[in-house]
Image (cartoon, grey):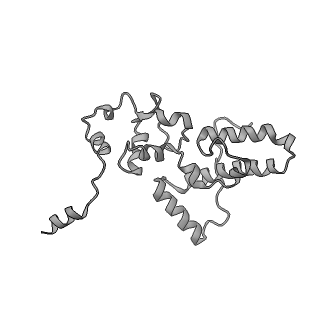
Amino acid sequence: MGDPKRQRKKFDTPRFPWQMDTLDAELKLLGQYGLRNKREIWRHKTLLSKYRGIGRSLLGMSVEERSEQEKQLLNRLNRLGILSEEAALDDVLDLTLGDILERRLQTLVFQRGLSQSIQQARQLIAHGHIAIDGRRVSSPSYLVLRDEEEKLSYSPKSPLTDPDHPLTKAASIPAEPVSESNEENSHE
């Protein structure tokens, strides 16, 4: 069982951490998804490898043995929004790290337009301004379930619920694209 007071490591480190292509790929993911450090990447990679490992072991079983476990795995990944409802076991092996990172609360807050940048999304979550179904969530790495996705909003007690708040106004107004006519007028 282990000591409940002591946290266990939830990730595996890379086998060859100093390879240049690995470092570049990790750095790109850090910037794209606004992650705090590489441990967050490694934690999601470990989760991905567990799901893929279960999928590989199920493919090695006979059809009768694996039917219920396969259904449980596919239902879990469907609830997380990582796979579609009509996905097969082979689709589990095709999963990438980006599929999991797209389901993080931080990413969805930014995609929903509740923040202006991915880093600001992380800050809003950490400061308690984001809620799912009225319940405040303060972990940016929380994996949002498919049915929770539409319930994502500002926390009821947050000052950001006021439509006159400067951040709310800035987030709701999309940036105006620069058209050619505007460029011509600005050069004259």
Q: Tell me: 61 left or right of 101.
A: right
x, y (%) of residue 73?
A: 71, 41
x, y (%) of residue 129?
A: 39, 36
Q: Tell me: 181 left or right of 25.
A: left
Q: Which of the 4 quarters of the picture holds residue 6?
A: top right
Point out the residue furthest to the bottom here: 20
Q: Tell me: 60 left or right of 110.
A: right
**Which residue is drawn at the image coordinates 31% and 42% (left, top)?**
172
Answer above or below: position of 150 versus 56.
above
Q: Which of the 4 quarters of the picture holds residue 93?
A: bottom right
Q: Quadrant of the C terminus?
A: bottom left
x, y (%) of residue 23?
A: 55, 66
**Which residue is drawn at the image coordinates 74% and 38% (left, top)?**
71
Point out the residue furthest to the left here: 188
Depth check: give the residue in front, 122 or 168. 168
Point out the residue furthest to the front here: 181
Depth check: give the residue in front, 59 or 127. 59
x, y (%) of residue 145?
A: 56, 37
Answer above or below: position of 56 versus 187.
above
Camera sees residue 122: no
Q: Quadrant of the N terminus?
A: top right
Q: Which of the 4 quarters of the picture holds residue 185?
A: bottom left
**Which residue is drawn at the image coordinates 29% and 52% (left, top)?**
175
**Which residue is drawn at the image coordinates 42% and 43% (left, top)?**
112
Camera sees residue 59: yes
